[in-house]
Image (tube, rainbow, N blue to C red):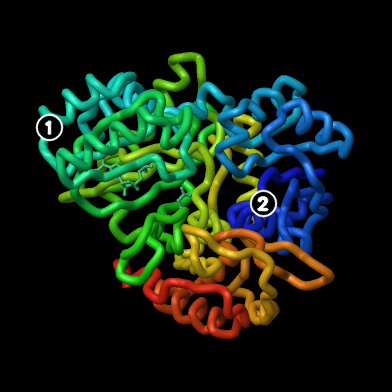
Amino acid sequence: MNILILGSGGREHALAWAINQNPKCDTLICAPGNAGMAEIATCLPLDIMDGAAVVAFAQHHKIDFVVIGPEAPLAAGVANALRGARILCFGPNADAAQLESSKHFTKEICDACNAPTAAYGHFKDAGSAKEYVHQQSTPIVIKADGLAAGKGVIIAQTTAEAIAAVDSMFDGQFGDAGAEVVIEEFMQGEEASLFILSDGKNILPIGTAQDHKRAFDGDKGPNTGGMGAYSPAPIMDDAVMQKAMEHIIKPTIKEMARRGTPFQGVLYAGFMIENGQPRLVEYNVRFGDPECQVLCIRLGAQMLDALLACASGTLDKARINWADDHAISIVMAAKGYPEAYEKGSIIAGLQVADNDPKAQIFHAGTKLVDGQTTSNGGRVLNITARGETLLEAHTRAYALIKEIDWPEGFYRKDIGWRAL
Ligand code: AMP
Ligand code: GLY
């Protein structure tokens, strides 16, 4: 079949790598793609936010299956447009994508199905939000309701900080995303993520992971999109997993179907786990980045079979063959990220993983310029490795990263510390 992947990050390179290994994949096109994806697929320009343009592109290239990587096109209804044109596609329609694009929507779903999550208030004006803050204790969490590229959450340590956060949101710091605000109880515990596929009715768990959001070692520095991840997450043991599935995931999928907006795609659930009890922090309606990279290196070619079963409503018949292994992905970012950074520096030594069946270098922000791989974003490379233990995967990945010649880049030296 002819397959189209929308996106250009490490997540999409990992999906392309996994899908490309499956014999069902005849032709692979990535739009817009990056330098790493260009080694295994045809990369073409396309405005992936424009549903009509994506449909026309898919028809022109006789695409049989479209995989939508990032959340923005999902929230913009690109999956609706593809389904409307009877093109098989992986990813939820816009109404189901509200599980990520509106924090308040997710809170209402949790209320409707009694799923454990932080207590909250929802506000459309600063006055009532501040009144609520004054009635609560600190720390307290102030969230822009809409999509804010992972930046719309402020954990306020004091009431004054919380009031300032409320003001900044209603003053437009996050644009339209902050026009409504959710204020939450601060939850203690350890965070972990669970990834499940759903075809709207059936559910297939495809792995757990933990990531490191802060830029620097010791979980210090500003928040980023993620500086590294590993799978599985030891804290998501069988007992926690069972609670998460029974009390949070299954009721959510059921409630979405009951509302006539079934969720089809990958649901990435973030939990706070304390004393063995998971509570929902948030949902995302797409794979995590770099969590997808560790899932893809563990699942390999069978990822395509799972995505196809999900998109075609046959997940009840799908099976995952689990290698009982571990994976880690370390992000190399441009110096300065997540604040200002330069683009366009040359990266060498990327062939180091070529002969290692247990390692892959996924490209996130790269671009080919005159035949040379150059940096083209904040997060640039994902050095990803497998092993029978996390320590083995960790040792393999860190040995490779030292061989990469990119003085303008940096990475964290302690990815996986919690699990090691
Ligand atoms: P979100 O975008 O909702 O996942 O929030 C980003 C990050 O903020 C989460 O991964 C948590 O680390 C933290 N966070 C969000 N909500 C809460 C909460 N209610 N209690 C504690 N930490 C939170
Ligand atoms: N790594 C966090 C995310 O993809 O949202």
Quarter of the picture holding the N terminus: top right
Q: Is residue 233 visible?
A: yes
Residue 136: give its label.
1
Q: Is mark 1 within 8 Å of ligand 1?
A: no
Q: Residue 164, image x and y in percent?
A: 26, 37
- Which residue corresponds to mark 2? 8
What type is the residue that disc 2 sits on? Ser
- When asked about the image quadrant of residue 417, the answer is bottom left
Camera-side residue of 389 and 417: 417
**C-alpha gap between disc 1 and disc 2:** 42 Å
Q: Residue 4, image x and y in percent?
A: 75, 43
Quarter of the picture holding the C terminus: bottom left
Camera-side residue of 256 and 371: 371
Q: Is residue 322 visible?
A: no
Q: Residue at x 22, y 34 (%)?
A: 163
- Note whether 53 is above or below 270 in the view shown: above
